[in-house]
Image (cartoon, grey):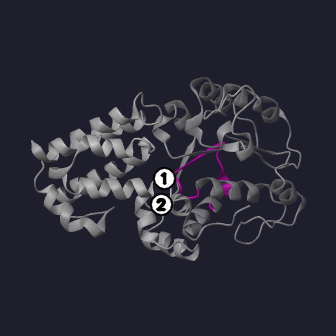
Amino acid sequence: MKTLYPWQTESWRSLQGLRSRLPHALLLRGAQGIGKLDLTLNFAQSLLCEKPNADGLACQECRSCHWFELDSHPDFRLIQPDALTATEDSDEKPGGKKPSREISVDQIRDLSNFANLSAHCGGYRIVVIHPAEAMNNNAANSLLKTLEEPTDNLLFLLVTHKPQQLLPTILSRCLSFVVHTPTREDGTAWLVQQGVKHPNEALTQTGFAPLQALNWAESGEGAEERIILLAAIRQPAKLDALALADSLQRSAPGHVIHCLQQWCHDLTSAKLTGLVRYFPAQAEEINKLAAGVTSAALMRFQKELLEARRAAFHPLNPKLFLESLLLSYRHLFSA
């Protein structure tokens, strides 16, 4: 079990304040990559622990904690898509089928026996669903039936960074708990402790989510594409959209769109408030560019990027997909 991250102290205290009046379903929501699942698992273990510490953390010594660490606690279930639980050596199922990114209705239905049993240790029975937005419609409706008829001492902990994708009826049956994104200072300090050489760059690249920043810094995934893209979009008048799309066609479209979204956010912010969030080193250039484009045009391009982000995992033609976005970006400044 991972220990709490430095920026989770306040969230942990708030969770402890709920122990005496827990609902039957708690929705922990916040940005991706800030440690929501680790926080939730710590909370689940602490509720199952036989002798938690004064700060509410699990003792790590009792029988219950031992079971939890071995993923064999009889009163606990973790429901995730197969893609999150698959090992590196088993990326594909038999027959060449890739592990699903969805939580299936069968996974939720399998909880029926667990939900109706008495707690093995006499306390809570806990189900963690992560990420909750991964439930398909059938799975969500199946869960809803259980939430509508809660049983004693059965606690659902739903973890999500996209609550807007959950059924309104599920949201209405959960107590919402916001897990806040750490400050830039807290995130940077933690990344420095992890040995990240350029913590500010890693943090801004990932929307100030420290865990994603660490993964990005370690893998370097998307870093080269980001350098190429930034060099081009800083000079839209000279931007060759077709050549740039050609050089980026083997990149993950999501990485390119993410960078464009951050750049467009800074252009809009600079125009409206004079502030730059994601690219402070390019603030002077961004302010000059922002002066030459209308707010309405920036809003339209942001909408186009948002729609493109939804299709990023399965573009029919990645090169044409990027060409269209880059041509739209160049057009912002030629209009």
Q: Going from the N terminus, do you reach mark 2 or mark 1 first?
A: 1
Query: What is the secondary structure assignment of the residue under circle 2?
Result: loop
Query: In the picture, which quadrant includes the C terminus?
Result: top left
Residue 81 at x, y percent in the picture:
65, 37
Horizontal side of residue 101 vs 303, given as left or right: right
* Residue 67 figure quarter: bottom right
What residue does disc 2 label? 181
Q: Are marks 2 and 1 in contact (CB under 8 Å)?
A: yes
Q: Residue at x 63, y 27 (%)?
A: 139
Q: Nearer the viewer, residue 68 or 237?
A: 237
Amino acid type indicated by mark 1: Ala
Residue 98 at x, y percent in the picture:
65, 32
* Residue 324 figure quarter: top left
Q: Say if the magenta span includes residue 21.
A: yes
Horizontal side of residue 73 vs 101, given as left or right: right
Q: Residue at x 71, y 66 (%)?
A: 56
* Residue 148 figure quarter: top right
Asked whether residue 156 appears in the rendered view, the answer is no
Instruction: Indicate whether 253 appears above or below 66.
Output: above
Residue 31 at x, y percent in the picture:
48, 53
Query: In the picture, which quadrant includes the N terminus?
Result: bottom right
Q: Residue at x 69, y 28 (%)?
A: 96
Horizontal side of residue 16 vs 313, given as left or right: right
Q: Residue at x 82, y 30 (%)?
A: 113
Which portion, as a residue range, is magenta?
A: 17-35
- Give the label on residue 31, or none: 1
